[in-house]
Amino acid sequence: MSNYLVFVYGSLKRNFGNHRFLVDSEFLGEFVTSDCKYLMQSFGPFPGVAFISSFNEEITKISGELYRVNQKTLDDLDDLEGNGFLYTRKLVSLENHDELVWMYLVGENSRHFSYIAKALRKPSSLFTKQIEISYNEKNEPIANWLG
């Protein structure tokens, strides 16, 4: 049986609406992305995160939860997230974790990507009350989805 590590940051987290997809999966803890090159944007009931390497800007790290999931759950998550259309599943690194893990990022082909690009041009609209920014000991910003 195959197992996959999936990092979630929005409606799939505990106490949020889509967590039901992960109830049979093993919770491995709360983590933060290693790279400080992400932008979290609110789309109302759920967030989206984009990797901003093409803009050459450091935006934030992302906080979330890590799960060990089976193939069926991964397939269900791909369907939920519209893998390849709305979101794209990518391998990312986490602080204090040796393995690469899967994370759903807003894909450049997604209609949501235009909102991300627009937010980059209007910094005042980057964050809403649904997104909390904290700072670690290195003064790196970390975005957390509050829902």
Image (cartoon, rainbow, N blue to C red):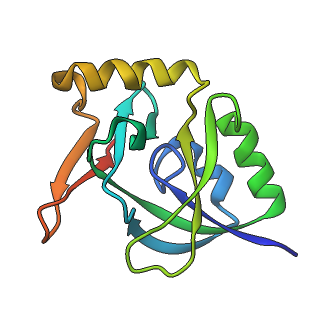
Q: Is residue 22 left or right of residue 51?
A: right
Number of callouts: 0
Displayed quadrant of residue 109 = top right
Q: Is residue 136 above or below residue 141?
A: below
Q: Is residue 20 above or below residue 70?
A: above
Q: Is residue 70 above or below residue 59?
A: below
Q: Residue at x 40, y 44 (%)?
A: 53
Q: Is residue 80 left or right of residue 144?
A: right
Q: Is residue 65 above or below residue 118?
A: below
Q: Nearer the viewer, residue 35 or 22?
A: 35
In the rendering, at what x and y percent does residue 7 appear? 53, 60
Displayed quadrant of residue 2 = bottom right
Q: Residue at x 34, y 40 (%)?
A: 39
Residue 147, can we see it? no
Residue 117, can we see it? yes
In the rendering, at what x and y percent does residue 123 appear? 19, 26
In the rendering, at what x and y percent does residue 117 appear? 38, 23
Q: Nearer the viewer, residue 74 or 93?
A: 93
Q: Quadrant of the N terminus?
A: bottom right
